[in-house]
Image: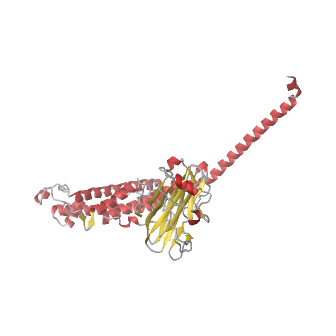
Amino acid sequence: MIQVRRHRFLLLSLVTHAALLGVLYMGAVRVQQDQQRIQRSREQPSVDAGERLMERARLEKRVRDMERIKSQLESGAAGKDEDVRFSAQPRTPEELLKQARELSRKIDEIERAARAERLAKLLHIPKQKALEKVAQTRKPEAPAAAEPRKPVDAAAQIEQLEAKAREALARRSGQLEQQRDGTRVAAIESRSGSAARQGGPGRPVGSAPGSGRLDGISISGVLGAIDAFMKSDRAGRGIEGNIVAGPHDDIDRTIVRIPDLPAGARVKGKGRIIGPGGPYADRVYVNRWYLIGPFERKHHDAWLLPDPPEQAVILDAAYRGKDGRLLKWEYVDSASYPLVPLRPAGEAVYYGYTELMVDKEQDLTIWVGANDDAQLWLNDKLVWRGRSVAKALFYSEVNDSGKPHAGDYNFSEGKRVVHLRQGRNKLFFKLSNGLGSLFFSLVLTK
């Protein structure tokens, strides 16, 4: 007590200063929080605009799918559905709805024509008469709906029209299955007894039983194209249709290096142009990308869960990323090898997009390496996926202080032979990082 009395002014001073420091600290925290709220409120219009662009992109994909369905119903083959689209800005919902309605009308016409053709063969009547019979059984069309005033109305209608188109494609697939298997189909198209008089139930529809052909086209091939389309959404961003050769396992357990050339003969290049106009090279390091990230994602979840860029690449869009950061696509011309995304972070996902110019249609070998997990798409089709499982030896070589393969653009863990079309080709990667360093390497050779 004597000590307390003796130093009471000192204690009082300490308590006062501690309280003052606490007040100042809380005030600083509050100011920082207020600044963050102000900053986020300023950024929010960009995020909202990005969400609207994403919605447009999703609608545009639905309309593109309707185009592919129309093509498959018309020709019975993949046709134009393999074409790669390059669009800087998604169209408005109203523009897309107008196109979707027109596509739906054409799909209805194709279905009616196909039904009339089957009916003509079944009843041995001219196709025009069969068309008249089909027209008589059609349900009266509902009056055209008024143009939507809100984008959400257009979105709902486009979704309905796309679902209707998918149902038409599913019916077509079922009919072709019957023709491929040589199934005999009863004359259910007509309720009159004429079918029985003309040959009755049991007459084959379309091609001869077991022929497996449809107007010179393999039915199995048509069914394969339809099946690939129907599964494409479940597969993420498409199937592995660009792969020419090479295994495609979830986990690659061996390290594959680009073969060495004599030092005097080796020519290395950077860029995105193969052929005239680009640097001649035995190996080309793809070093120019639009990058975005980091997105918040636990490493074990990143493999399955998509972020907005994986649904559509819109270079003008903005999103919320890890720690609430505003993310935008940024162009990176990497002078060093390998490519390291901006703002490296743990438990995060990054995306990259670029276009590769090729002077002529050809097959090339892609050599891929990543720390940690990576997926690569060429023209919207998955051509590579590699996980950090069983990559300990690869990591040890990459992290070696000497880095013997860095100077040769050879941080490669695997390869694929892929097919590129003449002109522009789209490349898109997803890179997931756990903890520690991260990078992505893509090198091309002939």
The residue positioned farthest toward the top in the image shown: 1
324 relative to 172 in the view: left or right:
right
Find residue 122 and report its image quarter. bottom left
The residue positioned farthest toward the left in the image shown: 197
Find residue 46 and report its image quarter. bottom right
Q: Position of residue 103 (x, y in %)?
A: 37, 62
The residue positioned farthest toward the right in the image shown: 6
Quadrant into which the N terminus falls: top right
Res 55 visible: no
Q: Which of the two residues, 403 or 34, is positioned nearer the viewer here?
A: 403
Residue 62, above or below 322: below
The residue positioned farthest toward the bottom in the image shown: 276
Find residue 219 and report its image quarter. bottom left
Identify the residue shown where x is 87% and y is 29%: 7
Q: Position of residue 158 (x, y in %)?
A: 41, 56
71 relative to 96 in the view: left or right:
left
Q: Position of residue 133 (x, y in %)?
A: 21, 61
The colour mode here is: secondary structure
Q: Position of residue 330 (x, y in %)?
A: 59, 61
66 relative to 404 in the view: left or right:
left
Res 271 visible: yes
Q: Which of the two residues, 162 or 429, is positioned nearer the viewer here?
A: 429
Q: Which of the two residues, 171 or 446, is positioned nearer the viewer here?
A: 446
Q: How many numbered circles does the render carry? A: 0
